[in-house]
Amino acid sequence: MSGAIILPVRTIIEPFRIKSVEPLHHTTTAERERYLEQAGYNLFRIDARNILIDLLTDSGTSAMSTEQWAALMRGDESYAGSESFFRLKRAVDDLTGLRHMIPTHQGRAAERILFTVACKPGNLVPSNTHFDTTRANIEFTGARAVDLPIPEAADTQARLDFKGYMDVSALGDLIRSEGAAQVPLVMLTVTNNSGGGQPVSMANIAAVKEVCAYHNIPLYLDACRFAENAWFIRERETGYADWTPKRIAQKMFSYADGCTFSAKKDAFANIGGFLCTNDDRIAQRESDLLILTEGFPTYGGLAGRDLEAIAVGLEEILDIDYLRYRIVSTGYLGRHIADRGVPIVEPPGGHAIYIDAARMLPHIPPQQFPGQALAVELYRHAGIRSVEIGTLMFGAAARHELLRLAIPRRVYTQSHIDYVVEAILEVNACKDRIRGLEIVEEPPFLRHFSARFRQL
Ligand SMILES: *Cc1c(COP(=O)(O)O)cnc(C)c1O
């Protein structure tokens, strides 16, 4: 033996190997031009078959594990009292400690039930930043959805460890001025999706809870990305470096009186969600409503096998190797484009990279949807699908003009991401040629899903 190798291998790899593959379909630029025209320049209207790399969303697009596929076979499809419900309930109890768990077909169904029960017209529901379906479901009840991000979040270039915070003093002021009776609940979105996928610290969760407790208002977590948030706390907040992600997540939930959850995010499931609460009376009213629109409370609009996949996913998502790889790979995409001149929301978030389209395309005003214009160009150039998060999605309430590149969990490899980096840098090199858009057709709400545009 010559000298022993003492340096450890440091490359962070995908902590899985591939057992089943799905071919990607290449298209030509001319074909993509045609698809764009047919779709009214709305990428939601383009057939998935004609997308090469799909970064539209990380929602419901995860690759399931062998254990999840195996769990599907255990699905108990009994209408009432399914074993799979109790398996999921145990997993959720263990994680959240919340008393009641109501399965729903996805996150927005949990939102609709929660806000229908909790909100009256004229109420307001504060959050660090509401997600689009959350905002729409609150406003559908006649209540107001109020965003209270910290002022620093307005600067996309500020590199804060925890940029997804709620502004706690603004929350206190709002509750005092409007009256606690007008605020049926406070929400915290972890991580803050619409705020750039930025994490919320444990200290902030605790501080928000303190304000809520003082005014006797329940705190709900919009917990879609609880595991990614837990990882950021482990990496960045003093005192958590040797905690397991699960223990951190349990502590996050210990401050909550309830939560909404989309299992399409941090549960690696293709469908599903749930609603939790500690309030027996509210839980009863929610179950009644669930039966009306989703199904019996032990399946809530899901198949038994879906409940199984979610139960397994909730455990797998907290794996240290997975979370390390997940956050590092998101950062890899972010750093490789940002360090070569593409303005992103700094620092890279958990599930997505957000390009600051207003900063990248200063020649396109917000009313001409710079984020959407960039999404269209990235598809035309390289077959990549992304999504606008700005004036198109939020109207006048938009704080930024962003293009979100959401990364499906366990789906794409590093060479896919290298392709995306290359494509974005090429688009950036010719960005002055990108034109704005005008809406020619739009529905009354959630218009970004189906609006049609014309190029200016
Ligand atoms: C996806 C998402 C929702 C809604 O969940 P769906 O399963 O898509 O209905 C709510 N809040 C946040 C933060 C989300 O990311």
Image (cartoon, helix red, strand yellow):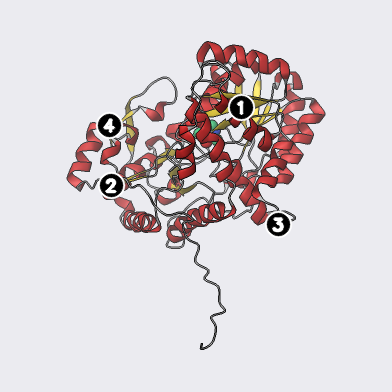
Q: Nearer the viewer, residue 233 or 144?
A: 233
> Which residue is at a point 49% across and 20% down the rendered structure image?
301
Q: Secondary structure at mark 1?
A: helix
Residue type, numbered disc 1 = Phe
> Which residue is at a point 72% across and 21% down the rendered structure image?
279
For discs 3 and 4, the disc positioned in front in the rendered view:
3
The residue wearing badge 3 is 242
First of labels 2, 1 by sequence position: 2
> Which residue is at a point 75% across and 55% down the rendered structure image?
239
Q: Residues within 10 Å of mark 1 (few under 14, many from 20)?
A: some
Q: x, y (%) of residue 107? A: 53, 28
User: Is residue 11 rendered to the left or right of residue 30?
Assistant: right
Residue type, numbered disc 3 = Asp
First of labels 3, 2 by sequence position: 2
- In the rendered image, is residue 162 in sight? no
The residue wearing badge 2 is 24
Residue type, numbered disc 4 = Gly
Compute the Cα span from label 4 to label 2.
Answer: 24 Å
- Which of the image's four quarters has the C terminus? top left
The answer to whether mark 2 is within 8 Å of ligand 1 is no
Q: Is residue 148 above or below residue 279?
A: below
First of labels 4, 2 by sequence position: 2
> Residue 86 — which label?
1
Q: Quadrant of residue 451?
A: top left
- In the rendered image, is residue 92 in sight? yes
Q: x, y (%) of residue 236? A: 66, 55
Q: Quadrant of residue 119?
A: top right
Check whether the beta carbons of the residues at disc 3 and disc 1 lie within 8 A of each other: no
Q: Residues within 10 Å of mark 3 (few under 14, many from 20)?
A: few
The residue wearing badge 4 is 40
User: Is residue 183 rendered to the left or right of residue 424?
Assistant: right
